[in-house]
Image (cartoon, rainbow, N blue to C red):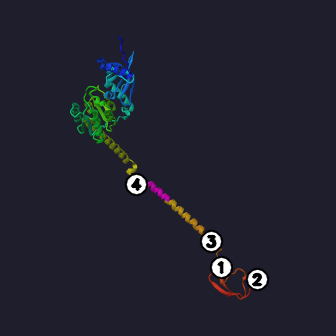
Amino acid sequence: MPVQIQVLSVTQLNKYVKFLLEGDDALRFVCVTGELSNFKNHSSGHWYFTLKDAGAAVPAVMFRDANRRLPFLPQDGMRILLRGRVSLYERDGKYQLYVDDMQPDGLGALWLAFEQRKERLAAEGLFDEARKRPLPQIPRRVGIVTSGTGAAVQDVLRILGRRFPAAEAVLCPVAVQGTGAAEQIAAAIALLNAREAADVLIVGRGGGSLEDLWAFNEEVAVRAVAESRIPVISAVGHETDTTLCDFAADLRASTPSAAAELAVPEQTELAALARALGEGLLQSMENNLAERRNALQRLQERRVLRSPEELIHAPRQRLDAAALRLWNGAGARVQTERNRLALLAGRLEALSPLGVLARGYALAKRGGAALTRAAMLAPGERLELLFQDGAATVQVEEIQMKL
């Protein structure tokens, strides 16, 4: 009997193969390990990659709803362990892995996420030492961001009260693990900064597993610590625990109790320091006073202060000498000028018409004008003759000219 052959379309064939693959219970839940390559983070949020080993390769896809739960980002060359199912992508006719979960092979997912986030934030400069600020030496208020019911807050309050009761403790209670804890921590830090409610912050919690401490590795909390204007002491877990908040903080404390020790000074040490400063100040004042007393004593022993009148002896003598020189110089100058005046007066007297008249001469004038030649006269004219002691009016009788 001849075998009946059914002719299928490509679509029908691929649907049938897909049905067979998805109907196989062994392929509905598979765990596969291999090396990741050709990783692509699509704009849709889906991840496409290839899983391979030394002998073969298989394409794989992890949809956004599944991969958003992963704390790390896969990278080419990473060895991973996948959990998912096998099916066929009908359009291309190729089978592939549909991944529901992914874990680093040999390295925990949280630890890998920690290292990746640490490397990225460090590249941004969030952990640079240059950003870190010193703590205030004597804070008035200490802000505490931690659980309000845990043992850590009680340890911090007890130590603050013992070491420096003058400082006010400002507690901002938050969840320190679980969903939303990182956001609460960041919000508390922002609130204390906005209200300028503290001079230094202690941010932390008691010890626990990496999962328990994970809120202090979340980016929102780490950035809040780094961006705080108030200096931050990170105190998460025990001495061996390390979180990203430790790297972002201005100072890391091994425990919350150690953070309280670092946040405030010891009041007895302050008292001892104050006494030492007071004693030093008193000694400095005494030394300064003694030095000034000695300087005053040296001044009192100076001859000029024992006999102040000696200060004016020499200036007085110089003044007397200067006055004498001035007097002598002025007298000589007056006599010189007097002699010069007499000489000039003699010269003036010799040139004066009155001097000529005194020697027996007379001055003839007509109408106020002096007559100097006989030719200027006419017989019968009346003239005025001026003498030393008076004047006379005369009439010209005769004129005699020189030949």
The tag earlier along the polypeptide, 1 or 4, is 4
Label 1, secondary structure: give it.
helix
Query: Quarter-wise, where is residue 393 in the image?
Result: bottom right
Look at discs 4 and 2 and give the one toward the viewer.
Answer: 2
Q: Relative to 279, is 335 on the left or the right?
A: right
Tell which of 184 and 202 is nearer to you.
Answer: 184
Find the magenta span and give its range.
308-322
* Residue at numbered disc 1: 357
Q: Residue furthest top?
A: 1
The tag earlier along the polypeptide, 3 or 2, is 3
Label 3, secondary structure: give it.
helix
Q: Position of residue 118 (x, y in %)?
A: 35, 28
Residue 156, compared with residue 375, is above or below; it is: above
Label 2, secondary structure: give it.
loop
Q: Was residue 313 drawn as part of the magenta stretch in this picture?
A: yes
Residue 398 visible in the displayed image: yes
Residue 95 visible in the displayed image: no
* Residue at numbered disc 3: 346
- Provide the major secondary structure of the magenta segment: helix
* Residue at numbered disc 2: 401
What kind of residue is marked 3?
Gly
Residue 228, compared with residue 337, is above or below; it is: above
Look at discs 3 and 2 and give the one toward the viewer.
Answer: 2
